[in-house]
Image (cartoon, helix red, strand yellow):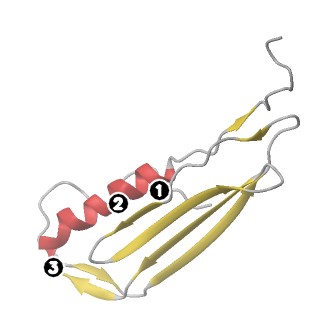
Amino acid sequence: MTCTDSNPISRGPRQHPFYVDRGWNREEAVIVRAPASMKAGQSRPAISTKSVIGNLILTCMPQADESFECSRAFVVRRNRWPASEQANIRAMFDKIVEADRTTAAFQQPEEDGAGR
């Protein structure tokens, strides 16, 4: 699955517009299986972010077989945006970096009669 590990939009002042010559529509899904004798932990809430150029939705849901199914959809429209939108676009990418650091946790199942 694609992960953005740093924000590609600089903090420095921008003078040129943002261009997207070809729109993006990237949808990805991955299934993460639990190691032997483990079960899926609690899922995190879906993460969603958007800006003037596009949006991202990331979800990780536990499945009946103790795996997680994570899906990531990132859509960016073809267009041109003024440099004044830099803060809006940068904020979206900050949230994408945070979302892409999401983890799926597994845990030991509780045994019947534990603590007796």
Q: Distance of mark 3 from mark 1, alpha carbons?
A: 23 Å
Label 2 belongs to which residue? 93
Mark 1 surroundings within 10 Å by alpha-carbon count, few (fewer than 14), some (14 through 19), many (20 or more) = some
Give above or below for 99 relative to 116.
Answer: below
Q: Work out whether mark 2 precedes mark 1 in sequence or the reverse, and give the earlier one.
A: 1
Q: In this rendering, would 5 be left or right of 81?
A: right
Label 1 belongs to which residue? 4
Name the amino acid, label 3: Pro
Name the amino acid, label 1: Thr
Secondary structure type for disc 2? helix
Residue at image coords 15%, 79%: 82
Q: Work out whether mark 2 precedes mark 3 in sequence or the reverse, and give the earlier one.
A: 3
Label 3 belongs to which residue? 82
Q: Where is residue 20 in the image (x, y as percent from the top left)?
A: 34, 83
- In this view, the residue in front, 115 or 34, is 115
Residue at image coords 19%, 66%: 86
